[in-house]
Amino acid sequence: MDQNFAKRRRRELLTAAMLVAAAAVVPLLVKDAYYQNIMVLTLMYAALSQSWNILSGYCGQISLGHALYFGLGAYTTALLFTKFGVLPWFGMLGGGVISAVMAMALGYPCFRLRGHYFVIATIVIAETALLLVQNWDWAGAALGITIPMHGDNWLTFQFPRSKLPYFYFALVLAAVAWFVTWWLEDSKWGFWWRAVKDNPEAAESLGVVVFNSKMGAAAVSAFFVAVGGGFYAQFVSYIDPESVMGFQFSLKMALAAVLGGIGTLWGPLLGAAILIPISELTSSHIGGSGRGVDLIVYGSLIVLISLARPQGLVSLFSRKKAPAR
Amino acid sequence: MTALLETRGITQRFSGLVANSDVSISVGRGEIVGLIGPNGAGKSTLFNLIAGVFPPTEGSIWFDGQDVTHLPAAERCRRGVGRTFQVVKSFETMTVIDNVIVGSLARSTHMREARRKAHVMLEFTGLAARADVLASDLVPAEKRRLEVARALATSPKLLLLDEVLTGLTPAEAQTGVELVRRVRDTGVSVLMVEHVMEIVMPLVDRAIVLDLGKVLVEGKPADIVRDPKVISAYLGDRHAVGA
């Protein structure tokens, strides 16, 4: 039994390594900048969704306000770079740490709320933060920040002429987010989080400090989302409040994980790989008319997937047969 | 030697309703104590107070020589209080083995060690064959055993069993009785709330009868079942007269 478990863990690791290797080759074959752009976004959302999944999937605290951490990461990176000349590498790390601290500060009151009330609080807080930044003159208020370009440079992480470096960074970010999840899954934290999600009272009776478990999940989750935000700021080189803190970011991270399989190791990746290309392709091919046809198609596809696989697309791959009932 | 668990003058009020009134009980080391009483006697409240779900309005709780009155449930678990729930609270989306691992993590945070111990507990409770099944797929009797396995995995000194034998078939209940005896034989004290007198009485070393939030009588099971006060509490005064 233990051997089976160890074998399964190794197989997961091997599968991930092969996926990373395969993904690394793709942009060398597909050289079209438009498709490379979609690939970068897909990998970034895979990382974001994977991080969101730690708090909301494993620990069961559904957040629809993670755009706050995404924005914090983006703004920290952009502000440190443009105002103080701090390299974005440190900006991303700094943004991650600030977000982790912020997540715990907000978690302190919010984790006393249960179920829907927690979800509402996350939305309200993220929207409030959006309004604050929109009125924060030093940070460019509603106009945002333009990050000046100085040519291809790994130090400043700017590549006006190529998408490849962004692609590889996003790939590493997605791989790290996956690996951290994989590692946490078989750690005390992973077990505590799932126990807290399923039944907090029983968890507490078994020595799990429910509150601390939630705080831990929130910090890890916010950290990686913020690093993704810092990356995004460098990738698009122009940010404004709505474009990095808007509700659509919170929603997309959650949606990818839910479509793929919430609280599962592979769900966020799978969900992002399907959701993001659909969203990008529909908006560029049938959008732009102003009639929202792209959103109708996009929405319908989501509805169809949810109807066919309510437990998430990852269940298509599960080796176990459906339990006999 | 002092008792393992002692409650001193515990009173619990819920906005006017007195659920426990001046309850002082004790559980010795290696003892199986039965807590019985009619519905609404305050058994579950007393249980939750001992497990640390909420602190009592008055009185104190002593465990293993220390005052634990204001310690939260998780900390009491670490001190050695394990419990099951009357309405089973399995981690439904987790497998049976994973449920038990959560318990063993209370003692060892090393995963390999925790997993090994969880397997031992599943063997002990006869659930080993169901290790990789989702908890939601267990039948009720198995879920009860899972509760016990999970609590035992925390290496408790005192195990609180909340109606684990209620609602089982006679054969299942018999298996349960034997399990409780084996638990005691490993050196764990047991305090069990139970409804079904004929199952509990042969099992326990001592019985405490609660009625209307107070300790009515306490003593050897054989004496308890003949006590007119107990009969009247359960069946009404009319039946006590002939006793």
Image (spheres, coloured by chain):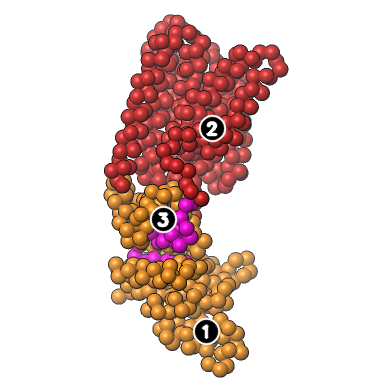
Which of the labelled discs sits on residue B230, or is there none? Answer: 1
Q: Chain of mark 2?
A: A
Give the amino acid type for the residue marked by disc 2 in the picture: Leu
Q: Are marks 1 and 3 in contact (CB under 8 Å)?
A: no
Tell me where residue A115 appears, x and y as whole percent. 58, 45
Q: Chain of mark 3?
A: A
Secondary structure beneath label 3: loop
Tell me where residue B1 appears, x and y as whole percent. 30, 75
Q: Say whether residue A288 is visible.
A: yes
B126 vs B77, nearest the viewer: B126
Q: Are marks 2 and 1 in contact (CB under 8 Å)?
A: no
Give the amino acid type for the residue marked by disc 3 in the picture: Leu
Which residue lies under the disc numbered 3? A206
Q: Say whether residue A49 is visible.
A: no
Q: Chain of mark 1?
A: B
What color is chain B drawn in?
Answer: orange
Query: Which stretch did the figure color magenta?
Result: B136-162
Q: Are marks 2 and 3 in contact (CB under 8 Å)?
A: no
Which residue lies under the disc numbered 2? A259
